[in-house]
Image (tube, grey):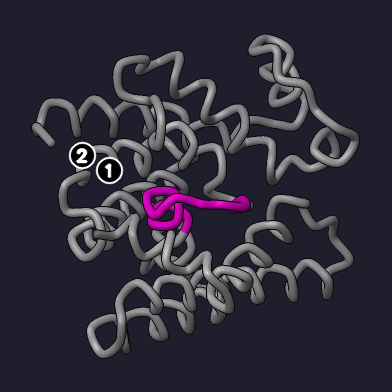
Amino acid sequence: MTGKLRKELARCAEERMSEKRFLHTESVAREAVELGRIYLPEDLDGLETAAWLHDITKDLDHGRQLQLCGEFGIMLDKYRAQSPGVLHAITGAETAAALFPDLVTGNVKSAIRYHTTGREDMTVFESLIYLADYIEPTRRHESCRKLREYFYSDVSGKDMKEHLADTMIKSFDITVGYLLESGSLIDPDTISARNWFVRMKNGGLFREFQERLQ
């Protein structure tokens, strides 16, 4: 990525975020590139772009999130209309695409859209942005730190494709456990993502995921 584009993306993020969230975003961008060097070295620019833009609407209040949904023609079910923590991924993907229409397409847009919940049939690109957001080193929660330690402790010691799938399953298990304990709603996409990775690991779907990393 050129320095000029990186500065433009960083400025776009910084203008829309608190200082704390911007530092997180900056760290996600670095983490996404590191993960990309392992799994998708041919797509580092796309990963970094998605990382810089993944949270650009997260600091907006719930009312503004719903307003953006209306402006973009996004239809929400009852669950997502009541889930501000999920809405920012939906509005963020559309906002990023409006701001950078030549850059935010395909995997970049879908990675922003699903970086919080995951989804069934996730691409490797989407998985890396989800994981970068989860384990970047400014995350202080113990579960984030432990997942980071798990991933990096064995990324070169076993089949790297299987290790990514294992790490994704662990991340969803942590998230679902936390949401259950806190009595929060669980996005259906998170359940679908977790179950898809488990089925993939235990059945023929894993070959398809492996082939995406060839």
Q: Which residue is drawn at 36% across and 54% down?
A: 28
- Is 120 a magenta residue? yes
Q: Give the range drawn in magenta.
A: 118-130
Q: Nearer the viewer, residue 89 or 8?
A: 89
Query: Badge 1: how crowded within 10 Å, few (<14), some, or many (20+)?
Result: many
Residue 176 x, y percent position in the rendering: 73, 69
Q: Which residue is drawn at 44% across and 24% down?
A: 96
Q: Do the residues labelled 1 and 2 touch (CB within 8 Å)?
A: yes
**Apparent side of residue 32 relative to residue 66 in the rendered image (left or right):** left
- Is 103 a magenta residue? no
Q: Residue reaching furthest front?
A: 204
Task: Write down the residue under mark 1.
Answer: 48
Q: Which of 104 and 55 is in front in this view?
A: 104
Q: Residue at x 45, y 31 (%)?
A: 109
| Identity, as a three-letter code, of the amino acid under mark 2 | Asp
Residue 3 x, y percent position in the rendering: 9, 33
Label 2, secondary structure: give it.
Answer: helix
Residue 98 x, y percent position in the rendering: 45, 14
Residue 153 x, y percent position in the rendering: 32, 88
Q: Residue at x 51, y 69 (%)?
A: 168
Q: Which mark is residue 45?
A: 2
